[in-house]
Amino acid sequence: MEDCEEITKKNIISRIVSEDAEHLSDLSLWKDIKDAIKGTEADYTLININKAILLLAIPMILELVMESTFAIVDIFFVGKLGASAVATVGLTETYLFLLYSVAMGLATAVTAIIARRIGEKQRDLAGKSALQAVILAFICSIPFAFIGIFFSKELLSLMGADQWTLMKGYRYTQWMLGGNVVIVLIFVINSVFRGAGDAAIAMRILFISNGVNLILDPLLIFGLGPVPALGIQGAAIATTVGRASGVIVQFWLLFRGGKHIQVNLSQIYPEAKIMLGIIRTSLGGVGQMLVGMTSWIFLMRILASIGSEAVAGSTIALRIMMFTLMPAWGMSNAAATLVGQNLGAGNPDRAESAVWKIGFYNMIFLIGVSVVYFIFNRSLMTIFTNDEVVINVGATWLKILSYSYFVYGWWMVAIQAFNGSGDTKTPTKINLIFFWLIEIPLSYLLAIVFGWGYSGVFWGVFFAETSMGLVTLWLFKRGGWKTAKV
């Protein structure tokens, strides 16, 4: 009897201890989530790797969700103006993608360099590198602004735009390309914060920018009271003003100082050695983005030859994909920061461990997304348009790509691991082979030669990018990225 009572007491004590441990674990997780959102001074080269992933991934995910919200909000309101208006946005984006390739390539290099300097505990040098990146961002924006302001109609005509776009939609292109400096700056300065580990700051910037854009979009597109209805031009103005608001806050926070990085007024002068280092590292990043973005231009040109509805449906589907992929890119960006900082701290094994963990989480998330695409592809499209042809185009693309998203999860993380290490050349070579030599010819062959129409383009994309994902993961496993220098 006494033995039974003793066993019962032990069971009760064990259950109480277990419940207390679970409660403490829940409290710790909630604290980590709050720290991730408000920012923390944690050293990501020393703390528990799962905690490091959580602290970086949450704000990076929210940041990129906010970035994609720009696209979703714009296309939601522009969709009310008709298929030609949506096609104008899509055709303009083919040129914006060239800009994004420069901005994102530069940002990729900046993240790798800042992360490496922070890992090496050289914060002053990290601050100097940040300012050199800002100077380069200004320089890169100038040619895009000039061409966009003075040659917008010619650019749209080159892409096969219809008469409505050439007569009315071109002002959207003028604004988006003419004010591109805010796009480049918001990418580059946020990459500084991410590389330093101040991901929460980058997240807040996008919250501010999106808030302004969300208010201005319907106001300027449709008008209200004394505010005239500017149509599609209003969407571009709203986006530009929204991003500009974010850039102003970025500069204020950069000079005030984050938890891991701060720049000083005394550092505002060109330093050739640092700037050349950024340029050298960014060439691979720009190259890989440029190859990917220009391939999209060719795909859009193929779709434009099929019709405005094909362009409009693809544009809406792309916005949906951008929105749902942002959490996955957020986790992938966390991998880039962890790889850069841990290589800087001389711990490549910890860097590799972080990539495998994040890759698994990414795969699980994107499998869930692919299920949604497969089942609700038409429902997602009807949120943005009631044009049946446009709905069919977008729904087809979402369904086809749902078959490959489990590969995307690993591919995205592996690519960012290369970039975070400073090895931006390997992803460039991969992109060159699979985008230019496989995706474009295959899409043209299936869509035009074989007569599959827009579905041929989508199947070409599916085959090329799934294959690319598998090859990228194989190259990552070989481990050459561990010896990259920045």
Image (cartoon, helix red, strand yellow):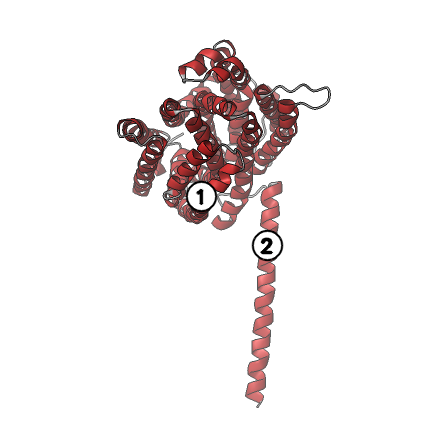
Q: Residue furthest bottom?
A: 1
Q: Residues within 10 Å of mark 2 (few under 14, many from 20)?
A: few
Image coordinates for residue 211, horizontal then vertical, percent: 64, 32
Q: Residues within 10 Å of mark 1 (few under 14, many from 20)?
A: many
Q: Does dot 1 land on a helix, a strand or a loop?
A: helix
Asked if 32 appears above or below 24 in the picture, the reply is above
Quadrant in the rendering for residue 108: top left
Q: Amino acid at mark 2?
A: Ser
Q: Which residue is mark 2?
A: 28
* Residue in the image at 40% along x and 41% along y: 399
Residue under pointer 1 = 373
Residue 329 appears in view: yes
Image location (x, y in percent) of residue 439: 31, 30
Left or right of residue 19: residue 369: left
Q: Is residue 446 left or right of residue 78?
A: left
Quadrant in which the N terminus is drawn:
bottom right
